[in-house]
Amino acid sequence: MLRLGNLELDLPAIQAPISGYSDWAMRQLAREFGAPLTFSGLMLAKSAVHARLWRQGGFRLGEQERPLGGQLLGRDPEEMARAAEVLAAKGYDLIDLNFACPAPKVLARGRGGALLREPELAVAIFRRVRARVSLPLTIKLRTAFAEAGDGGEGFWRIAAAAAAEGVDGLIVHGRAVAQRYRGHADWGPIAEVKRRFPRTVVLGSGDLLSAEAAVQRLGESGVDGVVIARGAIGNPWIFRELRALLAGEPAPPPPTLTEVGQVMDRHFTQVLELYERRRAIGYFRKFCVGYCRRHPRRRKALLALMAAETAEHVRLTIADWFLRADGAPVERLESARESTAEEYAP
Ligand SMILES: Cc1cc2nc3c(=O)[nH]c(=O)nc-3n(C[C@H](O)[C@H](O)[C@H](O)COP(=O)(O)O)c2cc1C
């Protein structure tokens, strides 16, 4: 069990905020396969009051979509507090403050990961938001700003202040801001946070691309929970696998090609409802790498999906490459010779 403020989650693994991906189409699938909490993407605090933002599929809550976390980006404490109030009014269940984002345009405006270099301002934001909303409040941090040399000074100051003032959770990504997504996440500092602040809920993030990796990191680091990001893109099954493994059961069999195809088809249908057609097709392509990763002819299936230019073509391609397979487990297909795999795909 994982407790974040008043939220009690029955799995210590949640779906990360993933800008450009975690709209309700993705979140719904993650939830269906077992994620106990999902996040929409990063929201610029000053945009929270704009009606246009709420018409987009990214931030709107779907039906029965609870609990849902929202994440705010900004550097003005009052703006952040106002945005948090908007999220609460819209029905969100948890608020996370982003002091981690490494995108150059975010850093140039002193937001996201840049706040690690202004720990007093970060703490002021935390205090102002905490005073204004009663929802569970978490903070997302990277472990340092510079790749070498700053010793994570700002990170430790923010973490210590937030822990002392009762933050509901620290979400720690084990990379420096300047590292962006390069190299490997360092779980040493993540485990160290839990050692230093044993009474604070700590969630680790970084390179949890499979259920096995997540279970191993949970055990080794002593954190209370983990956050699944890239590992969940085009792979909602990771939550089903996590549920089994953490219950001490054997890993469930991988999804059959048919099951993958059915999930893709449903996902694409929802994406078509959320976005205008041309955009929907480009948007859905981003998930196809994940969906194809267990396909015995991964590259060819992916190329076929990338080449599909109309919604009808996308559907036919899913049918050709996934649904017309005979339902054999991907694992079995994977071990088959390419010539055998020909039977399952064009
Ligand atoms: C495409 C993409 C978008 C992301 N968007 C966000 C975001 O909006 N907010 C956030 O806190 N982290 C974001 N992240 C970071 C992830 O939440 C996570 O901390 C990071 O990817 C490390 O986990 P992973 O290696 O398991 O993917 C994003 C990562 C990726 C790859």
Image: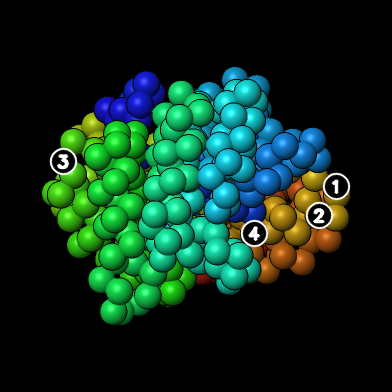
Q: CA gap, disc 1 to disc 4?
A: 16 Å
The quarter of the rendered structure image containing the N terminus is top left
Q: What kind of element bears circle 2?
A: helix
Helix, strand or loop under label 4: helix
Specify whether 236 is left or right of 157. Answer: right
CA separation in Å, label 1 and label 3 = 47 Å
> Does the numbered disc 4 mark a residue whose Cβ is under 8 Å from ligand 1?
no
Residue at disc 1, secondary structure:
loop
Q: Which residue is mark 1?
A: 276
Give the alpha-carbon distance from disc 3 to disc 4, as whole Å: 38 Å
* Residue marked by disc 4: 286
Instruction: Return the disc, 1 or 3, that comes first in the chain's sequence.
Output: 3
Residue 153 is situated, as x and y percent measured from the top left of the image, at 28, 65
Contact, mark 1 vs mark 2 (Cβ under 8 Å): yes
Q: Is mark 2 within 8 Å of ligand 1?
A: no
> Which residue is at 17% across, 55% downward?
192
**In this figure, which residue is indicated by the disc labeled 2?**
279
Task: Specify which label sits upstream in the sequence, 3 or 2.
Answer: 3
Q: Quadrant of the image for the C terminus?
A: bottom right
Q: Residue 183's x, y, as percent?
A: 37, 75
Q: Is residue 303 visible?
A: yes
Residue that badge 3 annotates: 198
Q: Amino acid at mark 1?
A: Glu
Residue 104 x, y percent position in the rendering:
58, 71
Q: How many marks?
A: 4
Please give the name of the residue rendered at 58% of the width and 41% of the height, measured from the top-left corner: 78
Q: Tell me which label, 1 or 4, sits earlier in the chain.
A: 1
Marks 1 and 2 sit apart, C-alpha to C-alpha, by: 6 Å
